[in-house]
Image (cartoon, rainbow, N blue to C red):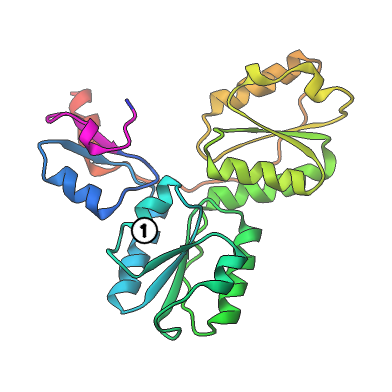
Amino acid sequence: VFVNELDEVPDGATVIFSAHGVSRAVQKQAASRPLSVLDATCPLVTKVHTEVKRFRNEGCEVILIGHAGHPEVEGTLGQSEDGVFLIESIEDADRISVGNPDRLAYVTQTTLSMDDTAQIVDALKFRFPNIQAPRRDDICYATQNRQDAVKRLVSRCDVVFVVGSLASSNSNRLREIAERAGVRAFLIDEATEITADMIDGCHAVGVTAGASAPEVLVKGVVDRLRGLGGKLAPEDTEVVETITFSLPQELKKVARDLSQ
């Protein structure tokens, strides 16, 4: 069951914090109640949270580059009671007011367009030459890899299908990258959304997916396209992802208990 507020969760239940992360206020509220809490926040999001807290402890105000209302952004903004400001565009960067330009830092949402984010960062650095950057790039490696892959893909495709939720930030960025290159692109949840007219007259069709899209959905899309007469071409294997993350300690304990 998906919930937006802890008030929707009855006492004694198990709560899983999503990969997007949650605010410190939500963490404290959960800890104050008789709940079993499993924190599944993505380690890359946790890294951004840690940066925000470090910058604030050092006396810096923090500018967060991200999309208003996105769950990850809400969680990151909630890592400090004050001093963290959200911007979404170059225009926002041009007009934001800060207390001390020499005590300023920025972080970013992990699922943004690399190109768009770079332009906003350049605008911030132009206005605030002493702004501090994160120790490492905040954008998720899986997001970066998929954006790079789509840029390679569009040069040889007539249309691109992106498998992912309409609410997925990184999936929408993949669709936008294809469209900016002049290639038709569709963001779909599953194979049943594909109709023959979508690929009518196409010689080559590209398939990609958001960072968290299950492989079974991607396979379903490929099978659907093959059923419409397509032949499977070699995959883009220029980048092979080998990074893995450990399960949260709480989930490891649950797994051990279930195996006994």
Q: Is residue 43 visible?
A: no
Around disc 1, counting alpha carbons within 10 Å, would you say few (fewer than 14), some (14 to 19), or many (20 or more)? many
Residue at screen point 28% across, 74% down? 57
Q: Quadrant of the N terminus?
A: top left
Q: Which residue is mark 1?
A: 77
Q: Quadrant of the C terminus?
A: top left
Coordinates of residue 259 in the picture (x, y in percent): 22, 24
Which quadrant of the view contains residue 172?
A: top right
Coordinates of residue 252 in the picture (x, y in percent): 25, 37
Residue at screen point 45% across, 47% down? 70
Which quadrant of the view contains residue 85?
A: bottom left
Dominant secondary structure (helix, strand or loop) of the stretch shown in magenta:
loop
Query: Which range of residues does the magenta coloring cover?
Result: 2-16
Taking the image as shown, residue 19 lies to the left or right of residue 222, namely left
Q: Is residue 232 visible?
A: yes
Residue 105 lies, with reference to residue 37, above or below; the image says below
Callout count? 1
Residue at screen point 51% across, 64% down? 137
Coordinates of residue 157 in the picture (x, y in percent): 82, 37
Residue 163 lies, with reference to residue 89, above or below; the image says above
Residue at screen point 44% across, 74% down? 105
